[in-house]
Amino acid sequence: MTLTETPQPPQRPLRVLAAMSGGVDSAVAAARAAEAGHDVTGVHLALSANPQSFRTGARGCCTIEDSRDARRAADVIGIPFYVWDLAERFREDVVEDFVAEYEAGRTPNPCLRCNEKIKFAALLDKALALGFDAVVTGHYAKVIVREDGTRELHRASDMAKDQSYVLGVLDDKQLAHAMFPLGDTVTTKEEIRAEAERRGLAVAKKPDSHDICFIADGDTQGFLAARLGKAEGDIVDESGTVLGTHEGAYGYTIGQRKGLRIGTPAPDGKPRYVLDISPVNNTVTVGPAAALDVTGLTAIKPRWCGAAPSGPGTYTAQLRAHGGETEVTAELVDGSELRVAFTEPVRGVAPGQAIVLYDGTRVVGSATIATTERVTAGV
Amino acid sequence: MAYLDHAATTPMLPEAIAAMTAQIAVTGNASSLHAAGRRARRTVEEARETLAESLGARPSEVVFTSGGTEADNLAVKGLYWARRDADPSRTRILASPVEHHAVLDAVHWLGEHEGATVEYLPVDAYGRVHPDALREAIERGPDDVALATVMWANNEIGTIQPVRELADVAGEFGVPLHSDAVQAYGQIPVDFGASGLAAMTVSGHKIGGPYGIGALLLGREYSPVPVQHGGGQERHVRSGTLDVPAVAAFAVAGEYAAEHRERFAAEIGALRDDLVGAVRAAVPEAILGGDPSPAGRLPANAHFTFPGCEGDSLLLLLDAQGIECSTGSACTAGIAQPSHVLLATGADPDLARGTLRFSLGHTSTKADVEAVAAAIGPAVERARTAGLS
């Protein structure tokens, strides 16, 4: 497999739409695209149905202040700027999905969903319809164009900042219209901030955004409790013995150790972890760390950057947004289910998260984890 | 570049720029007693007289403000407070639903915080308030009406209101009528003295004057409670040191507007008709907003609804072609909202999102119209593909 190592510079200036959150990364990305000679128009996505007038310390991506920061950056770059209201789509496709996944005992990744359904679907579709060629974002990932013209998604040059995991849901059609100006250079956040400063962008010193933009105060549990209500249930061990109560199974994530509030210690005195969440009977099962070891998993809704692989293959896999890599063999069964075996057992794999498969730095595809196979039977 | 957003702001007239720059280096607070103050005061008072004459008012009826928004707030809030102070039962405000937000949000605020009952007057499909509708609203309780407010001409769809007739009705019941004439001023005859209005708002930068200056024309018998307290300038109604250069330039623009209005209206009206014709030829399904009869709308206004399009998409596409216009409606946090004016006229909410307002002015040319004629068809086609998100 021969790769063109250097990403090709644009052959012709494109008309591109830069998604500008009001943060430093997307501002620098838009500036770089403009500097590269593209015809750039900035767009801020209004994703919150009730934008706060001004934030009170919390960092979201939906406030009026963010919108103004984005507009100010666009003015400095010298590009037109618009605000598009995608709040309804965002609510349906990201927020409701997020709540429903937690309610079903899974652990969703809303950023991934937003990329799949909003930035590279709703936004991209509208951009293409309006005559734009591509959407530019401030993600740290790299698009490499091969000699035959096919496009590949790769990890960012700077592995520490790589965000290819949350872009793993993009198929080749979406990828064909994606531009990530930040992925090609090894840059620390400090360097990006310095570049923003150099470019006269006032967002240079703006703090990083919160993980989940629509939960401005960062209190995910509070957000879920408000949406799903309290639903007391049992916390049990692997044998089914009740150890305590919880106020909603959705409040737990597989692999979680803290905040279990179990009075009695484990017989062996070792810490206990959430092993399983069962929304059907509203129970949370806890047990020793060893019981978290997973040897394999099945994942659904696979999406491929290019052709789906035929037959089993060996890949490296990433299982959560900031997780490391692990070696797997994976096979697509019936075209819709991905069966994955880990070379070494992996701890704390949560259904609902995405598994992204890599061939070296290249993103092969992704799927949503549905079930896991544990070393110890039972759960 | 085709600048077709003169209703947002229009280029300053060279004469106004000259007047402003001449004054900007001159020292003098118009409230001071010494020579410098007297000089400034003379400039201000001459400007006041010029403006008064151009608007059919007495000089003492001109209260300078920082612009249209402040004048609207002063009229609506000030008259409400004064009338309620005189008789606590007067808490009803009658307003047209097609007002500019400077009026609409002010009356809404009075409703939320000052115990006002805000009643919106019915309008027809062109956004016009019928005098009988005002009469009917007042007659439901003539003694508890604090004030009525109906704009002279609408900023989005250009519809002209029957101000004289409305003022006659209000006058029968002793109800003060305020009218925001920001858009009408310079395009159609605006005579405060003959209008029967209690108060009327005008603004500088819509007629070729500078930003940041406007005036409330205020009948001498009215003493609205000030919004802004301080040194007692402007009949103790609007405190604050006057911006002498802006006042002087405003007067120059006002005088120019009065002198050239008829010719300007005829020329700009013909150009507007060309633009309307060009848009209709390119996009037959485009719906002209407001009153189609020339007598019923501002000569410089052309407003369209493009079914199936989002106004924002059209703006983006036309902007990329160097055509600068507006959707006409206000936005919240930069997010386009369906126009409250169109909604008030009974338009479908989806349709109300697909609007464009072209507003012409003293620098508009045939080339501007030709640019729109060439660009609008493809832009509408493309925006329709993008649809309503």
Image (cartoon, grey):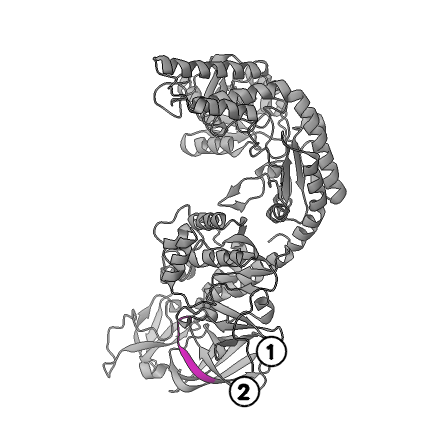
* Residue B23 lies in quadrant: top left
Q: Is residue A146 left or right of residue B229?
A: right
Residue labelled with disc 2: A312
Magenta range: A321-328
For badge 1, the amino acid type reads Ala
Q: Can the viewer see residue B202?
A: no
Disc 1 crowd rating (10 Å Cα; few below 14, some 14-19, many 20+) is few
Name the element at disc 1: loop
**Looking at the image, residue B359 lies above or below residue B80:** below
**Looking at the image, residue B165 lies above or below residue A126:** above
Front residue of this view, candidates A326 and A349: A326
Image position, residue B295 (x, y; %): 70, 25
Question: Mark on residue A307?
Answer: 1
Front residue of this view, candidates B186 and A114: B186
* Residue B262 lies in quadrant: top right
The chain to which mark 2 is attached is: A
Can residue A56 be found in the magenta stretch? Answer: no
Can residue A327 be found in the magenta stretch? Answer: yes
Q: Is residue A189 left or right of residue B55?
A: left
For the C terminus of chain A, the image quarter is bottom left
